[in-house]
Amino acid sequence: MSAAPLYGGECHYWRHEAQQWPQVLADLREAGFTVVSSCVPWSVHERHKGAYDFSDNRDLASFVSLARAEGLEVHLRLGPAVGAELNGFGIPERVLARKQCQAVSGRGTPLWLPWPAKMFPAPSFASTAFREEVAAWFSALGEHLSAAEAQVSVDCDRKAMGRIGAFDGDYHPDAIEWWLDFSDKRPAPRSYEEGDMQRVLAWVRFSEIYEEQSEEWLREAAQEAGMRTAESTPTQLTIGGAPWFPVVTDAEQKNSVLLSLASGTQEFNLFMATERERWSGEALSSDWLAPLLAALHEAAFHTLHRKAPITIVASRAEKRAAIASCALEGATSTVTELIGLGPSGHAELALDSAARLYPRWLSAVKEALDLVEVPYRLLGENDLHQIDGTTKAVIVPTLRRVDGGVWSALHALDITGMRVVLGPEIPVEDELGGSLGDDAAKPAGAGLLAAESLNDIEGLAADLLELAGELCDLWIAPQSPNVTCTPFYDDSGEAQLLFVRNRSAAQAAAEANVPLGCVLRDALSRESSAESEGIAKVTLAADEIRLFRVGREESQ
């Protein structure tokens, strides 16, 4: 966790006149932001190959200097596919028009991205020609920013481009060379074949490696150009949306941000913070923004922690199988969202039964823990090192497949005495569809989720409640089953902030158990609720989440 809070706001410098920058940056600082973030679109600066414009409202170095003078840190996202509702996602059309730079689909065609207002071919991050173009752009940008105090980040997230199919790409010759090295010279699959699942799963895993290798190269290219790359990037929380998507209300946006914070997001970037074209909604126009950031600063939110006795580990093994076997292969993420596929999203259309069922089990476990107000945290496969002495039990929903490294880690945790729960099935295959062989036996002390629990959330909740051990009877609303309370504590163990969420579609009048003498002050409305006989009454609208500053009567 950073020594200072990283509360970022997105401001696209080139979309404002240069003379507006001082006021915009002052507004961000006054609202409580500590970081100003912006993408840096290649196409905005390039006039023609080798010629770049860093004048007027494209003078990024001057924007950075003004931000630093205002007391703001600066985070620049270089992409190179930055999105930002720009044609070509900010990559110059001349680059995307070069066949050598284009990603190749499984059908041997350019990988077209149907993005408003103009579709374009996706770039191949494996392409040597594309990398040479990027390196030249980074070199010019690095020279311009040579005296600027800013951190930069890079990415090549193809999902952000709307391409989520296993066989969308990339079949560029340079990418295929990577694949052949990874796969011991096996031909790259171009469609789902149930009888060839190992090769298909290897291709999906290779797609992840493709992104990892590409981002590593982009970081090195930025560093070679003299730019300072960020070690990590704050979580991006969206405020508003592109005009071709359904309008999100201000109340919905507030709830979305509060829910992310309650779930453990403590460093973030609000996208967007300032007004711009091709976008509807921005944080600075929301009445709740400044009070929220003030409350986070006052409580030193970035230093607080949740107490979560249960850790859920989300496996990618079945997710890869869902991607590989999707019946709607080639559809963009926007299409699948508009269809309304259900709680499992894209996995609802998986031809592989275990892959289709896995997200439902993951959701069932989370819903059951919420029902009995047991705090939990969700970790990915690469985050198991975060499991520590505060964790009482680890739950890992499993079906046919499991990552081999996760399986070994669960055996190791079991040996230490950590309670481990798997199931409802004991996996028999690793993440690439190979047999677990001699390692197939489940950890000796591990429990199994009952198969019938998927349709009996209350029964599952009762079973999982026992895993948490003896829980504190404070910061819960026992008479309101659809209301959850999430306190954040300081290092002394005192609760400083409390998120209260109504998960039902009807208004709720909750009675939360709180310490004697406690006063809850709504961080946004400033309304206070003092406890009476250890009970604080909180009214919540349907699907609402509220944030309270926790205090004592004598300090109010």
Image (tube, rainbow, N blue to C red):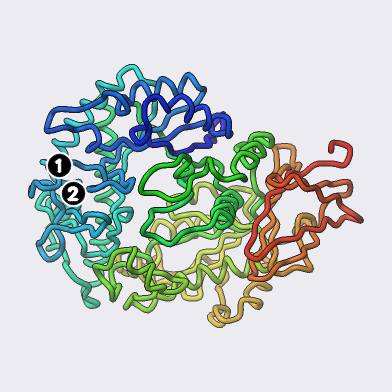
Residue 543 — which label?
none
Task: For residue 357, say whether it is visible.
Answer: yes
Residue ID for mark 2? 123
Counting the numbered discs, the total is: 2
Task: For residue 437, say whether it is visible.
Answer: no
Alpha carbon separation for disc pair 2 and 1: 7 Å
Residue ID for mark 1? 130
Which image quarter: residue 19? top left
Which image quarter: residue 492? top right
Q: Is residue 94 above or below residue 160?
A: above
Q: Is residue 266 above or below residue 372?
A: above
Asked if the residues shown at circle 2 and circle 1 are in contact, with their CB atoms under 8 angstroms apart, the answer is yes
Percent of width and height locating residue 168: 21, 62
Percent of width and height locating residue 18: 37, 26
Residue situated in front as seen by the camera: 288 or 266:
288
**Secondary structure of the residue carrying numbered label 1:** helix
Residue type at mark 1: give it.
Answer: Phe
Name of the residue lying farthest toward the top: 147
Q: Is residue 17 above or below residue 437?
A: above
The quarter in which the C terminus is drawn is: top right
Q: Is residue 468 above or below residue 304?
A: below
Q: Is residue 131 left or right of residue 75?
A: left
Residue drawn at x 40%, y 42% as measured from the top left: 276
**Secondary structure of the residue carrying numbered label 2:** loop
Residue situated in front as seen by the camera: 274 or 454:
274
